[in-house]
Image (cartoon, rainbow, N blue to C red):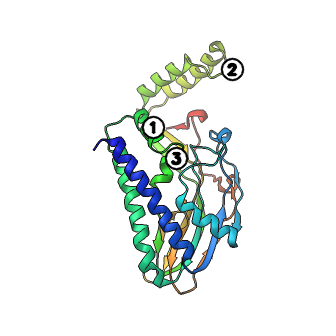
């Protein structure tokens, strides 16, 4: 079977299984539903890091519908970013007995998601060909939304939501980095002339050349991401990404610590990197 046909079949299977899960969850008795709605990232905001992210808490019918709908959402709304996919932290709690019928449905969805991810990521297609494949098979869909696993638990005591504001760190060879800067000097950003840009980059090259180390570290801040610390009665606490609502099967009351607004200033620390080149997040 060729990869286009196989991807098409898996995507159709994912959509069907996700709808079946949505129907089952909608019909089951929901003991509590907590939904933390985040503002969408618009297409024109893709390149800027959010300094403030307001969180709207809902535990009414609207919140429940939003939380349930997150499991079948694979496409962004009109005007929303394809690079910053939809996120909806939350909790949906059902009777312990409901796990008998619903947990197997979640396992099926997660298995299909994993199979789809493996098929595409391990194929011999390059990035452009993978993009074209998904655009053909699932027009408008976002890969990450198709890959995200659905987390479900029992025996939960507390779910505490928080924000993660981490860094991506890479180490570059100093000589190669200088060559990169030399190439950058010949390609000024839009609106800046080469005569204006070159002296600026030459100063950066001089700074890097004076570094004694043979390597340069790139420590780039990552976008703030919702996370959750999940504590159990009989297991160790687990830290999980909170991109989708957590499903809990338990008859016992659980405690949910809400996700507060994200404010970048509150996450600034004295030990944040002192960059050698700010625009490239370069340090020794």
Q: Residue 2 or 171: which is nearer the viewer?
A: 2
Q: Are marks 2 and 1 in contact (CB under 8 Å)?
A: no
Q: Is residue 10 above or below residue 205?
A: below
Within 10 angstroms of label 2, few (less than 14), some, or many (20 or more) residues?
Answer: few
Judged from this view, the residue extending furthest toward the bottom is 252
Which residue is denoted by mark 3 in the rendering? Answer: 141
Q: Secondary structure at mark 1?
A: helix
Q: Residue at x 42, y 62 (%)?
A: 109
**Image point 55% across, 16% down: which residue?**
186
Real-space CA distance between mark 2 and mark 3, rounded to the nearest whole angstrom = 34 Å
Can residue 229 be seen in the rendering of this structure? no
Q: Position of residue 77 (x, y in %)?
A: 63, 49
Q: Residue 30 vs residue 212: left or right?
A: right
Q: Earlier in the sequence, mark 1 or mark 3?
A: 1
Q: Is residue 54 left or right of residue 231?
A: right
Disc number lying in front (2 or 3)? 3
Q: Which residue is mark 2?
A: 191
Residue identifier under label 1: 131
Instruction: Point out residue 24 in the picture as x, y percentages from the top left corner.
Output: 50, 72
- Few, some or many C-alpha atoms within 10 Å of disc 3 (few <14, some 14-19, many ≥20)? some
């Amino acid at each position: 079977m060729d990869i286009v046909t196989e991807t098409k079949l898996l995507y159709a299977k994912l959509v069907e299984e996700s709808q079946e899960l949505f129907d089952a969850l909608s019909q089951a008795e929901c003991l509590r539903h907590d939904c933390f709605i985040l503002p969408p990232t618009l297409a024109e905001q893709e390149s800027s890091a959010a300094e403030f992210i307001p969180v709207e808490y809902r535990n009414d019918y609207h919140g429940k519908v939003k939380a349930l709908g997150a499991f079948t959402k694979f496409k962004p709304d009109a005007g929303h970013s394809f690079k910053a996919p939809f996120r909806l932290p939350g909790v949906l709690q059902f009777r312990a007995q409901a796990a008998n019928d619903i947990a197997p449905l979640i396992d099926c969805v997660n298995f299909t998601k994993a199979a789809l991810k493996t098929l595409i990521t391990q194929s011999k297609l390059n990035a452009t060909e993978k993009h074209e494949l998904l655009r053909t098979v699932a027009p408008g869909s976002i890969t990450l939304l198709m890959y995200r696993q659905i987390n479900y638990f029992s025996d939960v005591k507390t779910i505490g939501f928080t924000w993660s504001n981490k860094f991506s760190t890479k180490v570059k060879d100093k000589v190669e980095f200088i060559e990169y800067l030399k190439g950058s000097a010949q390609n000024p950003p839009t609106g800046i002339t080469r005569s204006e840009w070159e002296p600026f980059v030459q100063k950066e090259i001089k700074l890097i050349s004076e570094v004694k180390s043979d390597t340069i570290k790139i420590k780039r801040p990552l976008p703030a991401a919702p996370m959750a610390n999940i504590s159990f009665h009989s297991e160790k606490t687990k830290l999980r990404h909170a991109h989708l609502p957590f499903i809990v099967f338990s008859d016992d009351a659980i405690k949910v610590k809400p996700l507060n607004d994200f404010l970048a200033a509150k996450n600034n620390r004295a030990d944040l990197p002192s960059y050698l080149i700010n625009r490239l997040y370069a340090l020794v």
